[in-house]
Amino acid sequence: MLEGSPRSPATPRPRETHLGGHRAESSALPSRAVWRLRRRSPPHFRRRACRESGQSKTACKTVIQPAAQRGPRMSASLSGQNVVVHLLVALFGMGSWVAVNSLWVELPVVVKRLPEGWNLPAYLSVLIALGNVGPVSVTLTHHFAPGRLKEQWLIPGVQAVAVLAALCLALCWQRTAVVAGAAHSLAFLALAFLLALASCTSNVSFLPFMYRFPPLFVRTFFVGQGLSALLPCVIALGQGVGQLECPNGTQGNASRPHYLEENFSATTYFWLLLALLVVPALAFLALVGWQRRRGIAQEGRSASKDSVETEESFPLQDGGTPAPDSVAAEVAPAKPPASTFWTGRNAYLLALLGLSNALTNGVLPSVQTYSCLPYGGNAYHLSVVLSNIANPVACFVAMFLLCRSSLGLGIISAAGGVFGTYLMVLAALSPCPPLVGSPVGVALVVVSWILFLGLFSYVKVAIGSLLHEAGHSALVWCGAVIQAGSLVGALVMFPLTSLYSVFRSGADCVDSCGV
């Protein structure tokens, strides 16, 4: 056998790359064309460089196709079977905070029958804060023992705790016990803590699980999270929570409010809560089963063996220069070094995410009654329902129009902050804010709540989608920051609203402003 022939053992066989089903030897490509193919340049440059190398149009079209579309991972389109998957993801996301949101909206009913009375919101705030032991434990486990805690086992455990707690809540929420000589609703408080623990832990378990899906499904997940706030409000409105009548249709100081009976009891409401928790659990099982049937279940975003020979996996030196052709021909392509997550941009996105959740989940919800009720019960109900509708609508818009600019997200957050500031001013001036008794005042407060939650909801889902591209650990940090921001906002507002009474509310059926 002649030296230098294709089968000579002295000559290493050139490395073969797959280009759309064709095999092309990398040594046969011109050095300049190989380098231009390896660069992450715009598609038209890569297409022209590929044609210069002598490949067919079909092969070159496959070269510039994103790896996420060529691999076995499912497409993120909104057609065919993926519509069902989007629906399952939305139902799965709905189970994240539906339990805690349901407890909050049902408080006006349960406080009439539990011994704590209107001190119950303070107890519930403390229990939700204690529920953060769950996400703290999960985050520390991911940090000190990476890879040990699997979402496919953690999520069913979290959902099982929530379902069992809701079942017990529907059966025995009114039971009390004597502690230190006073009656307390131990059953309700203990079960509320379990529901809070499950909801808090969902932020650091549900989101990392979504790393198995393309980024578009992360936005669908946030749509489901918006439904976790909307559906309890809709059910509470159907129940008739907070409805009252003023005698003789007056708002004078001599009127005494007559509170109307609810359309159905709190027990029935908690049974509906149980159904709202069972549906996400079934959706998760369906998602896992669907993944297994499609053969796409995998840990992290590991590339398929058939798609490693893409332009992203060509060996590059640290300085960004192409590796010599001889080295590329003799040595298998080295795995590119993992990019550092803690960049300035990612830190900025996490800070913006924490601020958004502090405002939308902690600060402004604490003063929503103070900002809305002076304009009437209808203004309050419209603000609650329509703002919660704005949440999933904003997430749905982000599925088609996603802002990737850090500056753009900052501008959107600033616009949401303007409306948030207006609402805080109204709460501080309660019970006599500007334009009380005017339809203009009602319209302004309702629109402000809609735009405030809508803009910040868009920011949150956009940041979540961008962090999805940074890796599995980025989604863990995303969930942790969401929970931390919500906790900080609630802790800041708790002493202002419950201890120091900075904000004041007017009495029902009493005209405090002389309108």
Image (tube, grey):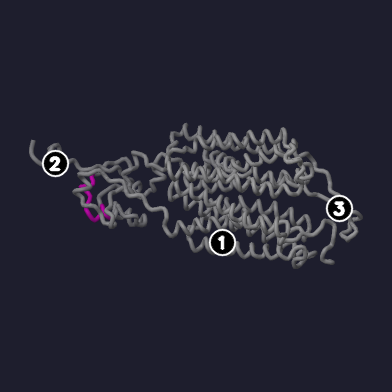
Residue type at mark 2 is: Thr
Q: Is residue 465 left or right of residue 277?
A: left
The kind of secondary structure the magenta stretch mainly shows is helix
- Residue depicted at x 44% and y 45%: 143
Above-or-below relation of 157 to 126? above
Q: Which residue is mark 3?
A: 257
Q: CA distance from mark 1 to mark 3?
A: 40 Å
Q: Amino acid at mark 3?
A: Pro
- Between discs 1 and 3, the one toward the N terminus: 3
Mark 3 element type: loop
Q: Name the image quarter holding the N terminus.
A: top left
Dot 2: few (<14), some (14–19), or many (≥20) neighbours within 10 Å?
Answer: few
The answer to whether any part of residue 311 appears in the image is no
Question: What is the distance, in whole Å, between disc 2 and disc 3 at their CAs?
Answer: 95 Å
Give the image quarter of residue 459: bottom right
Question: What span is colored magenta in the figure?
Answer: 25-35
The type of residue carrying mark 1 is: Ser
Instruction: Point out which mark residue 11 bears.
Output: 2
